[in-house]
Amino acid sequence: MLALGKLLELTLTDHEPAEKTQVTPKGVRLRWLGEGALEVRPPEHEDSGLDLLLSAGIHGNETAPIELLERLLHGVANGKIKPRSRVLFLFGNPAAIRKGERFVEQDINRLFNGRHELSSGFEALRAAELEQFARVFFSKPGRPRLHYDLHTAIRGSKIEQFALYPYKEGRKHSRRELARLAAAGMEAVLLQSKSSITFSAFTYEQLAAEAFTLELGKARPFGENEQVNLDKLEERLIQIIEGTEPETEDSLEGLKLFRVAREIIKHSEGFRLHLPADIENFSELSMGYLLAEDLAETRWVVEEEGARIIFPNPKVKNGLRAGILVVPDSGQCLG
Ligand SMILES: O=C(O)CCC(=O)N[C@@H](CCC(=O)O)C(=O)O
Ligand SMILES: [Zn+2]
């Protein structure tokens, strides 16, 4: 196997490879671009025209997706996977991955779309660097752009694997991409209804990629991910990389659709979330339920029929989202 296939090992040991570019016997070019960043380029005559960005480890303790990218990279580097797409592999927050923690100083997934400019510290610098890797990678005109940012969640979930689809004014969510996600094993998609500061929101809003955050199960340390079954996603990603993906029908049969009704924002240290600590994502909340309180008599009361809670977390920094309220969506607005 080509040494650059060991991107995870290089990243975990904070090593810069002596040889930055390597080519497989079949002419696939691997290029190390910087810490945790590797570009894969197929031979020109085999290029399918797709540019695919796969990122994981934006949160350092979310190891199942990191292990998945490592398997894909090994496959490319030992010739078992035969790429026909350009692929950029990114491990998002190497310092946090080395510590096995969600972040070191601050959540990198709240620093995109310009937010890093208002902040300092290495996570802000890393967010700017990740934006730049993505900007350069997605700079070739006329090629479809696809980004999957892979995560696992802090808590258990009534729906194990789901995608979050960013929002941009005037742009429709794609039915075809949703069908592709269903084929990759996603059970639900959550349609965002405003712009955001996450990595997938950046590539969607600013780089015109089809972009998604994928939630793939519960976060666990390296080597303890047997319960996270990524077989369907892995199979689909190999097909996308190799350009052998079967035509997906546009039917969304079996895929649950939700829309973000409201984000719960923590404004102060007085913020109180009235939910059991072990509540699962997608738990239903009844109308009139007092979900949270904050200073100045701010009250978050459930007003939406069929509301469910996702990512409840009262420990976030002030000004950030402490949960998302979602409601079922009919899919009428898909393009
Ligand atoms: O389990 C949790 O509370 C968070 C899991 C996670 O990291 N989710 C992402 C979602 C990103 C998005 O909204 O697209 C995050 O919170 O950054
Ligand atoms: Zn995450």
Image (spheres, rainbow, N blue to C red):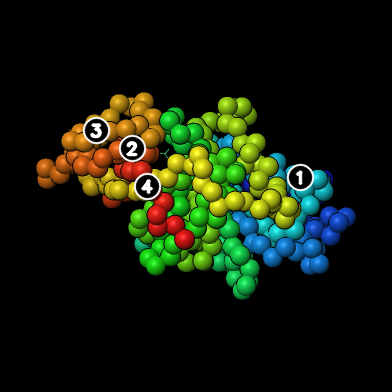
Closer to the N terminus: mark 1 or mark 2?
1
Look at 37% across and 59% down and name the residue there. Answer: 195
Name the residue type under label 2. Answer: Ile
Q: Is residue 103 left or right of residue 142?
A: left
Measure the alpha-carbon separation of dots 1 and 3. Answer: 47 Å
Q: Residues within 10 Å of mark 2 (few under 14, many from 20)?
A: many
Residue at the extreme right of the image, as rendered: 25
**Element class at badge 4:** loop
Measure the alpha-carbon separation of dots 2 and 3. Answer: 11 Å
Look at 60% across and 70% down and name the residue there. Answer: 139
Q: Is residue 132 visible?
A: no
Q: Where is residue 25 shown, x and y percent of the image?
A: 88, 55
**Element class at badge 3:** loop
Q: Are marks 3 and 4 in contact (CB under 8 Å)?
A: no
Query: In what quadrant does ligand 1 lie?
Result: top left
Task: From the image, tell me which residue sits under label 2.
Answer: 309
Name the residue type under label 4. Answer: Asp
Task: From the image, tell me which residue sits under label 1.
Answer: 75
Task: From the image, tell me which residue sits under label 3.
Answer: 286
Name the residue type under label 1. Answer: Gly
Q: Are marks 1 and 2 in contact (CB under 8 Å)?
A: no
Q: Where is residue 167 shown, x and y percent of the image?
A: 41, 58
Measure the alpha-carbon separation of dots 4 and 2. Answer: 15 Å
Judge depth for marks 2 and 3 and give the one in front. Answer: 3
Q: Where is residue 11 shown, x and y percent of the image?
A: 64, 46
Look at 55% across and 55% down and name the residue there. Answer: 176
Task: From the image, tell me which residue sits under label 4.
Answer: 329
Name the residue type under label 3. Answer: Ser
Look at 49% across and 33% down and name the residue there. Answer: 160
